[in-house]
Amino acid sequence: MNAELHCEISNFLYHEAYLLDHRQYKEWLDLLSEDLVYQMPIRVTSDNKDASNLVYEMKHFEETKKSLTTRVNRLYTTSAWVDNPATRQRHFVSNISVAPGSRPEEYRVRSYFLFKRSRASDIETEQLFGEREDVLRKENGEWKIASRTIYPDQAVLSVMNLGMFL
């Protein structure tokens, strides 16, 4: 990968984090491809050091752009209790690596993430962290997320709910 492409993709991911942190969810939806697969397999604690500790048959969620659009639209109603009062959140993205994808104008992108969230006047903060595997592609000259698989490092998630977008 050349430095210019890496910089362009990194800036795209930073822009995505900005949109999410500033609750610009409808604008975030514009970054998603129509055929998006958005999923988070479950991580388990395994006694076998050589075995995978990810369970792909079970997921915390497996969504499409349509289901994410439904979730986003609900956030703009008065019945979105999970987000009332609105949380304060930050998405940190690092360790971005880019490799060619299976099609032209498509790239496999790995990144590490740290998500922090505070609610109301709570002293405690919630966090999730781990790795993401994305497929990014150019569609009509703009980057789109075609797929995202989120691998949390925690086997037991320390968040009240999964109402956030990672």
Image: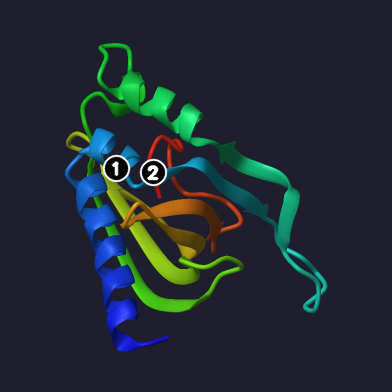
Residue 110 - label: none
Q: Could you tell me which residue is drawn at 33 percent across and 69 percent down?
A: 9
Q: Quadrant of the N terminus?
A: bottom left
Q: Is residue 125 above or below residue 104?
A: above
Give me the C-alpha separation between circle 2 and circle 1: 10 Å
x, y percentage for residue 124? 29, 47
- The front one of 39 and 152 is 39
Which mark is nearer the camera, 2 or 1? 1
Residue that carries the numbered disc 1 in the rendered image: 28
Left or right of residue 4, residue 164 in this image: right
Image spot of residue 20 (x, y percent): 26, 46
For the residue marked with disc 2, what is the amino acid? Phe
Residue at 80%, 72% in the rendered image: 51
The answer, for residue 79, to whether it is visible in the render is yes
Q: Residue at position x 55%, y 37% from top?
A: 63
Occupied quadrant, residue 48: bottom right
Mark 2 or mark 1: which comes first in sequence?
A: 1
The kind of residue tagged 1 is: Trp
Q: Are marks 2 and 1 in contact (CB under 8 Å)?
A: yes
Tag count: 2
Label 1 sits on a secondary structure element that is: helix
At numbered mark 2, what does the secondary structure look like: helix, strand or loop? Answer: loop
Give the residue number, with chain letter if any, for mark 2. Answer: 165
Q: Residues within 10 Å of mark 1 (few under 14, many from 20)?
A: some
- The percent coordinates of residue 69 (x first, y second) are 40, 28
Q: Is residue 73 above or below residue 108?
A: above
Could you tell me if residue 124 is visible in this image? no
Identify the residue at the far bottom of this view. Answer: 2
**Vertically, is 33 above or below 2?**
above
x%, y% of residue 92?
29, 63
